[in-house]
Amino acid sequence: MILKQILKDLRKEWTWAFFYTVVVTMTAMAIVYLSISFSSVSKQFSFIESFIENNVVMFNLMVTEMERAPNESDSTEKPIASFSDKMNYLQESLSSEGKAGSFVFVGNDGYVDDKYKQILVLFGQYEKLAGLDSSESMALFVPEISSEDVGSTVELAGKEIKVVNTIPSDFSLFHPLHYIEAGSSLLSNTLVLTTKDFKAVDNMFPWWGLDNEAFQRMVLVNPSNIEVEELQGLFYNQFGTLYKGTSTDDFTQITTNPSLRAHRLLMTFYILAGILLIFLLLINTIRMIEVHVIDYTVHHLYGAPISLIQRRVGGFVLVLNILPLIGFIFVLVVNDLAMWYQLPFMILLIAGLYAFAAAYVKRRIGTLNSLQNLRRDY
C-alpha cells in the first residue's frame, strides 16, 4: 500500500527526479575529476619539496633558430665539443663524486628474464632522488612479487648484478617535467638498475643511445653557477643550441601559481554548487510536502496514523534521491572508485532528508489538523 502511494507521488514529480539525477551526476563527475587532479598534485608535493630543498636544477633543450654570435674578443677559436666530450661528461658527472642524475627506460629485448617488461636505469644522484639509494656501483631492485631474488644475482645484458632490495609498492618516479605515478604500466613488472658507471651501462645497451636519453632528463643537485654553465656550454659549443638549466623552485613558481589559482577558483565553485544543491533539495522537499499536504491530512483523517504518512513521505524522498545516488555511484565506478569515501556522505545526506521530510510533514499535518484550519481548507 505504501509502495503504491510512493510510486503515485513519484509519477507526479518525475521531472524533478530526472533534474536532480542529471545535476547531481554532473556535479559529482566534476568534483571527482577535480579531486583526481588535486590528488595527483598532492602526491607530487613531497617530491617537489625534496627537489627544492636539494636545489635540483633540471635541463631541457630549447628550440631556437639563433646561431651563436662570434666573439671578436676571442683571440683563438673555442674548441667544439665532441661525442667523446659528452660521454666523458656523463661518466664523470653521473659517478658517485658527481652532482648529476638522470634516468632512462630500456625495453626488455631479451636482456633479462621475461617476467620483467622493461628496465628502469637510475643514474648518479637520481638514486637518492628516487629513494632507491645503494652503496654498490651497480645494484638491482625488483618488484615485491619477486622478493625471493633479493640477495642473489640476476644476469642483465650478460652481466651478473646483485639484487639488493625490492621496489616499494607505492614507488613513483618524479621529474619536474615528468611524473610517473605508482601503479603505472611503466613501473609495473619493471626491473630497476641503479648505477654510478654510465659507460658500463651504455655498453650493456649499445643500441639504445642512452646518452641522448640521459641528457633529456638531466638534473644537477645543488650545483654551482660554474657547473650549470659548463653543462649549458657543452651543448652550445657543439650544436649552437640552448640547453637551459632551471631550478625546481623557479620552475614551480612559473608553472604552478596560475594552476593553483584556477584550482582554488574551481574548488570554491564546486563547494558553493554543492551547498546550493543541498539547499535546493531541502526547498524541493518542503515544496513537495506543501503541494500534497492536503492529501496527507485527508489520509490521516480517514484513519492513517502519522507514522504511516511519515513513511510514505520519507519513502518518496528516499526514492527521489536514490536516483542521483545511482548516478553518483556510476561516476565512481567509471573512475575506479576514486573518492569512494564521499559515498557515505551521500547516504547520510539522503537519510537526513528522509528524517527532515518525516518531521516536517508531521508538523504540517498537526497544523492543518486543528478545527480552524480544517474549516478554512474544506
Image (tube, rainbow, N blue to C red):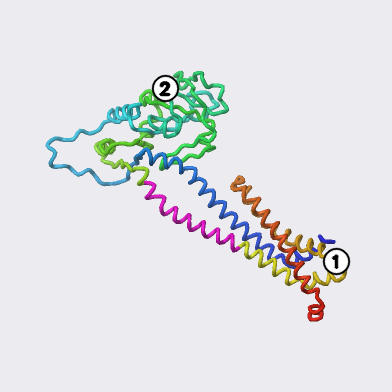
Residue underneath mark 1: 304
Q: Amino acid at mark 1?
A: Ala
Q: Classify residue 63 as left or right of residue 322.
A: left
Position of the C terminus by quadrant: bottom right
Question: Quadrant location of residue 114?
Answer: top right
Q: Horizontal placement of 81 versus 10: left or right?
A: left
- Is the residue 282 above or below the residue 344 in the image? below
Q: Amino acid at mark 2?
A: Glu
Q: Nearer the viewer, residue 56 or 336?
A: 56
Residue 98 % position (x, y): 33, 29
Asked if the residue at tag 2 contacts the one at tag 1, i.e. Cβ–Cβ closer than 8 Å, the answer is no
Relative side of 93 to 115, left or right: left
In this picture, is 190 found above or below 179?
Answer: above
Comes first in the chain, label 1 or label 2: 2
- The segment highlighted magenta reads 251-276
The front one of 328 and 280 is 280
Residue 257 belongs to the span the image colors magenta:
yes
- Tell me how many marks there are: 2
- Judged by its main secondary structure, the magenta piece is helix
Give the quarter of the image for residue 52.
top left
Mark 1 element type: loop
As drawn, the label of residue 278 is none
Which quadrant would the N terminus be assigned to in this image?
bottom right
Residue 130: give x, y in percent of width and height.
44, 34
Percent position of residue 234, x then y? 27, 35
> What separation in Å lies between label 1 and label 2 (alpha carbons)?
82 Å
Horizontally, is 354 left or right of 54 in the view?
right
Q: Dot 2: what SS? A: loop
Q: Which of the labelled discs sits on residue 136, or is there none?
A: 2
